[in-house]
Image (tube, helix red, strand yellow):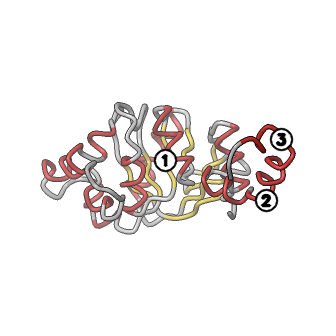
Amino acid sequence: MTGIDRVEGRACVLRGDDIDTDRIIPARFLRAVTFDGLGEHAFEDDRIQAKGEHPLDGEHFTGANILIVGANFGCGSSREHAPQALMRWGFRAFIGESFAEIFAGNCTALGLPHVTLDADDLAALMDSVMLDPEQQLVVDLEARTVTSRVGTVAAGIPDGARYQLLEGSWNATQVLLGAGDAIEATAARISYLDDFPG
């Protein structure tokens, strides 16, 4: 699997703290057997209440692949459907003040970078994108920075998540399948496994 060292693109600003997973993808959409089609329901209830004024429905944010959020984004239940829905909407990275731990872990498992900025840098970035939503942002995992028209600022990401994204080892199932020969070789060296039928 190829690693991810940066994500470039336009951003969408979603203001507010403590936005939970039930708002990101309402519970009634969790019954799906697969995640196909989940993206169209991202923030569905919020978008209905906003009557076309929700940031995800704003024409100036159409095609944005980076979502800028506030503090404690993705709190609440541990549903993997939340980052799945946002990924299927088209987002490939997240910038925020902080992320709920399980949401962040689910993002890593999907290969979605999620970096944090201090409150002042985040506020300046949000304001800049609101004024010029056409600008290109760069989330650089190697350098741990975010670059925009405001300039380049330091970005935080846990070392483990950063390593997995840079090395391309975030998909645990794919890593396991890719290690098939090594697993077979190890199993052949374990004598007590000979006692179990094939």
- Residue in the foreground of this view, choosing between 18 and 28: 28
Q: In 3D space, how far apart are the residues under numbered discs 1 and 2 (Cα atoms)?
A: 47 Å
| Left or right, residue 62 beside residue 2 | left
Quadrant of the image occupied by residue 130: bottom left
Task: Tell me the residue at 78%/54% (across/down).
Answer: 184
Q: In 3D space, how far apart are the residues under numbered discs 1 and 3 (Cα atoms)?
A: 55 Å
Quadrant of the image occupied by residue 168: bottom right
User: Which residue is identified by label 2?
Assistant: 181
Task: Tell me the residue at 69%/64% (across/down).
Answer: 2
Please report contact status of discs 1 and 3: CB closer than 8 Å, yes or no. Answer: no
Amino acid, disc 1: Leu
Question: Few, some or many C-alpha atoms within 10 Å of disc 2 (few <14, some 14-19, many ≥20)?
Answer: few
Q: Secondary structure at mark 3?
A: loop
User: Which residue is identified by label 3?
Assistant: 190
Q: Earlier in the sequence, mark 3 or mark 2?
A: 2
Amino acid, disc 2: Asp
Amino acid, disc 3: Ile
Q: Which mark is residue 125?
A: 1
Which quarter of the figure is the N terminus placed in?
Answer: bottom right
Q: Earlier in the sequence, mark 1 or mark 3?
A: 1
Closer to the observer: label 3 or label 2?
3
Q: Secondary structure at mark 2?
A: helix
| Left or right, residue 58 beside residue 136 | left
88 is higher (above) or lower (below) than 150: below
Closer to the observer: label 1 or label 2?
2
